[in-house]
Amino acid sequence: MTRLNVLLLAMVMSTAFYLVKTQYESRRLYTEFDHARSEARKIELEKEHLEVERRSQGTSLRVEKVAKEQLHMKSVTPAITQYVLNPVELQDTKVQEAKLDFNANAKGKIQNNVEGVLSP
Amino acid sequence: MSRKSVQYTSSPLLASKTPIWRSQFIVAAIALGFLGLVVRAAYVQVIDNAFFKRQGQVRFVRSVDIPADRGKILDRNGAILASSVAMPSIFASPEEIERDPVKLKALAKAVDMPLAELQSKIKNEEKGFVWLKRMVDESVEQGVRDLKIKGVGVRKEYKRIYPEGESVAHVVGFTNIENEGQEGVELTFEKELKGRNGSRRVINNRLGQAVEDMGEIRTPMDGLDLQLSIDSKIQYFAFQKLKEAVIENKASAGSVVVLDVNTGEVLALGNYPSFIPNNRVNLNGGQLRNRALTDTFEPGSTMKPFVVGLALERGIVSPQTIIQTGGGKYNLYGHVISDSSAHGAMSVNEVIQKSSNIGTVKISLQMQPKDLWEIFTQVGFGQKPQVPFPGAVSGKLRAFKTWRPIEQATMSYGYGLSVSLFQLAHAYTIFAREGEFIPVSLLKKEERATGVRVIGAKYSNEIRNMLHMVAGPGGTAPKAQTMGYSVGGKTGTAHKVEGAGYAGHKYRGFFVGIAPIEKPRIVVAVMIDEPTNGRYFGGDVAAPVFSQTVQQTLRVLGIQPDMSVKPQVVSKAEVESF
């Protein structure tokens, strides 16, 4: 009887210690998890910050300024633009153009300029 | 004690027999007391334990906020127009702050604030919390942290950043320091953008670290990202050209609206003067006004196409019908209606091309006021535009029953009613959509808008042809022409109303048009308010902005030119296989 009691006491004590250890471990891990979570949040905020920064470096206002002042570029107009089409679509476009040309000639108003570019 | 004193054992008091019930009564009372304690203990522990449990938790469980992010505002291509970033804010606790003069001086320097101001902020020692400086740079934050002053701390706050600056300021609007929308889309879509903060309960240890999660009270909900229909490139360009025109013409203000007629999306909406949303010091009401939607004016000649369109539909005239406009003066009910010059007999086409008031009046007088009122209403005049903007106005269009005959005549050439530039641009979509009036949208959408028919496609195309002639040789707005794209539109110049009458030399010049004319893709409306540099006609001040905006917009949309262009640079093009 005494033996059994001692055994039970030992078992109770060991599970109690184990419980305390597990509880401690779980709290330690949770602290770590919480820390990682706030770190993730911090990184997320930084990413947001960087994205905004990237965008503000690439706004039309800045691009135009740099293009004009540093790279000495000029604005394009249709007169200095060449429209190049995908050859696969070219066949379809030519058919459309023929129609357009026909319409334009019929009305005597519109001339299409792209064909010179399309058939070099 | 004397020897004569009574011995305990022989005490006469003990000699008397104590009644037994007394001891029994005491035992029973004590037992009852214990029973009461047991019952109470059982009640507290088992039956009604919620109160004590709660009281226990209050003492060790902390509630922590989980902040929700405010949604971003994006343009149609996903470029950021407004976004929140976390910024450090410096606070102090006057209760606890170390009042060491040397340290305070260093702190004042770190937050760039006069020492006196800092001292006045922390004067009240009973206060637990005051902001010293909100939304500072990270270098300031580091400087403050390095000082290690007790009672001074840093908290993260959200600041709204607007990378596009003044060009899109009126559309996007802005938020206040508490991150609440105050103007524009920020205000209208406040509910969607805001989101909802969440919170969770944790057990903190002595060091303030969370050691156990007690569950979420409320899940945070981030605000929704809004994708607008605005194209930031088109917006920037249109705004820039408008700004140049306002400055060049020494005007007081200007607005521009670009609509996509396929989808009804607003591609650009700009006003000048504008403001830089990130820096709102010394702002005035004029800068904040979204003029394209809040300012109304008499639309002048831009109304003529609607009157003529209705007359075509009713079969009253055809484009070739000859109208006699005489010597440029026409007497009607004792009022003189005049044209800019004597045009004599002209076709309906020419009435629009040369913008003849007399011609339009003669056409309009053949119709009933109700019919005119109906078409004006159908294209949105006198009604609030269905766009989500604070302060959008409906303009003025009186009920047809109150029109006098002379008013019917003046309204046909745009006097006696008022519209906003946005309404005007929206109304012109009927000529771009073959007679259909489509709903407009400020949010991105892909599908083609379905409209309500106002006039027949045939008549709408006839009007479009007339609008094309306006921008052609002999029209009122040759400056609207663009390189490579065919355009059409109508000029308008209106005397500004001041008090009860018209102001002497104050005008508003505007132009609203369609491009490309054969296969319309956009409607652009431009208004220049009070130009004072000699020219004030819409064809002179607004049409050039229209021309440049159209050209750039169609390029950005990837639309091929429909007119021949004389090449300036000759180089060989090589078609490569893709």
Image: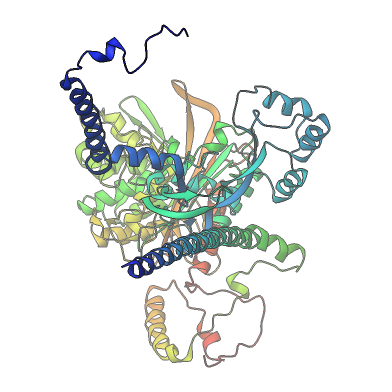
- Residue at coordinates 67% horizontally, 78% vertically from top-left? B569
- The answer to which of B213 and B141 lies nearer the viewer is B213
* Residue at point 37%, 42% (across, down): B325
- In this rendering, does residue B265 appear at all? yes
What count of labels does the image hold? 0
Q: Residue at x 22, y 28 (%)?
A: B27
State the image coordinates of residue B526 (x, y, percent, origin top left): 50, 48
Indicate whether B176 appears above or below B438.
Answer: above
Front one among B446 and B550: B446
Query: Is residue B113 toward the left or the right of residue B178 in the image?
Result: right
Direction right: furthest residue: B102
Quadrant in which residue B38 is drawn: top left
The x, y position of residue B81, in whole percent, is: 53, 55
Q: Nearer the viewer, residue B152 or B475?
A: B152
Residue B389 in view of the camera? no
Q: Position of residue B407 (x, y in %)?
A: 31, 30
Q: Position of residue B537 (x, y in %)?
A: 54, 43
In the displayed structure image, the side of residue B556 where residue B427 appears, left or right: left
